[in-house]
Image (cartoon, helix red, strand yellow):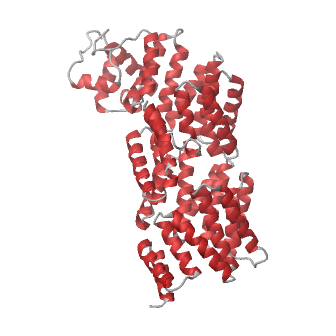
Amino acid sequence: MGEPDHVAAGSRSLTKGRWSEATASFEAALAMGESAEALSGLGEALFYRGDLARAVEVRERAYVAFRNAGDAAAAARMALWLAMQHGAGLTNAAVANGWVGRAERLLDGLPTCSEHGWLLLRRSKGASDPAEAEKLARDAISVGHAVADADLEIAAISQRGRALLAHGRIDEGFACLDEAMAAATSGEVGFDTVGTACCDMIGACERTMEIERATQWCQVTEEFARRINFLPIFAFCRVTYAGVLMAIGRWADAERELHEALGSYDASFSMQRHMAVGKLAELRLLQGRDAEAEELVRDYAQLPGCARAIAMLHLTRGDAPSAARLLRRRLGAVENDVLLSAPVLALLVEALVACGETDEAVAAAGRLRAIATTTGRAAFAAAAAHVEAIVACARKDPSAEERFEAAIQAYASIGMPLPVARARLALARCLAGRDDRAAKDECRLAVATFEQLGAKRDLDAAADLRRRLGVGARVGPRITSTLTKREDEVLALLPLGLSNAEIGRRLYISPKTVEHHVSHILDKLGLETRAAAAAHVAKGRHRKPAAK
């Protein structure tokens, strides 16, 4: 079989996702004589097999071969691919910029072709101004449409969605991402474009807490990654989905996803494993496993994927100034992207308040509120309400209690249990000394969530407050006073696992009233959680009230 047959066979294997077969075919072709097409194909196969270092080396040879053959457009295509891998995969911005420069020079003076559009797309990805990024993406879409390059057009639509989201135009951005994903998963485009669209979509879902959309597209992405056996996309999907799971309180599921992601990265793009490491370190800190978190990020201190975890670690050690310095630097790098800057601002406010820098904290909280207003996203509005409450509390502002209540309601509406419980604990601190009964109620509700999640540090903080409020350790259940008839009715429904809203509908009372009844029941029975109360009833320990 001659070389053209090997190259053709390798190309067919690439379209089917058969990376090992493609590798063998292209290597057979190269054994008979080096050619640009065989080198390019082999580089692609190696990339999908996770061997990025060798893929880059082979495609650098392909670039030279295309240049020697006088094919400037193909050489520019290789240069742009190399720019992407040096920038995103190998995190070497200087080399990436050099390859972009080579592509620009090669395309100068050539008639409009796909490569011009891919160059525009690359410029869009590198633009710091979201408005400029969006314009360049639109120009790339136009080129893709004009030259009938579906991959370019769809990749540019996805990039435009990213740029719109970064600019705060959330609905428009997701419309683009949905369109790109629909086209990508229909088989209309190649694997590279599918991967790009998947990563753009899932990353945006995590940052905006679009939980339902994230779940749906993660399933699609996972199926695609399994079908073509491309571990890096599979790993990125797991990392971002883990972020969603952490936010909604499914920590065990999040941990499983992160360990799977680490396994995928270790088997392929190990240089990108820091993304999973950073997220796992955040989870360990939430669990109060500080030593493990510190060990995880020890070798990744300079990488942006671990910045949030390291800042959280500083805060847990009581080193708020170091946390604030790190977060200021991180904010400077992402301040033009509202999705990336919002979580940095939220953590920065906490650090600044801990430092006593309340004026700067007010300014940071104001920026987060502006993002929430611009985007209209509930997750950002909840975070803004929370940090505003933290600042108000630090300034002894009477509005702090009302602001914490707003944060609790906002977080609850989007199903984020840990922030709800933390806001309740903060509210309890505000109430302590003025309304100790209400403070105990809020603290008890917070403790129930911390126990359910396994948030050890938060439990310790709640225990400190409980001691100040005169609530000691409980050895076992006790009845300190008779339950009212309504409290008894509520208690009887707890073993059914009903929510406050469901109990309220059965008893024709509001969920808030149910919440207060549950709090009083727990106080009277000397129990910590509604689960304990349910078990108490199930074991037949509850005495019916004597009084009507």
Q: Name above or below for residue 281 compared with residue 359.
A: below
Question: With 205 as the anchor, is 160 left or right in this view?
Answer: right
Tell which of 516 and 420 is nearer to you.
420
Tell which of 40 and 536 is nearer to you.
40
Residue at image location 61% in from the left, 34% down from the top:
346
Tell which of 411 and 296 is nearer to you.
296
Quarter of the image where the C terminus is located: top left
Question: With 86 as the anchor, is 237 left or right in this view?
Answer: left
Residue at image location 55% in from the left, 51% down from the top:
203
Residue 240, position as x, y percentages in the image: 50, 49
Residue 51, position as x, y percentages in the image: 48, 64
Residue positioned most to the left: 540
Q: Name above or below for residue 480 compared with residue 214.
A: above
Tell which of 525 and 486 is nearer to you.
525
Q: Residue 360: which quarter of the image?
A: top right
Question: With 543 as the anchor, is 291 left or right in this view?
Answer: right
Quarter of the image where the N terminus is located: bottom left
Residue 153, position as x, y percentages in the image: 63, 69
Residue 355 appears in view: yes
Q: Name above or below for residue 424 compared with residue 499.
A: above
Residue 183 appears in view: no
Residue at image location 48% in from the left, 75% down from the top:
14
Residue positioned most to the right: 109
Residue 371, position as x, y percentages in the image: 67, 40
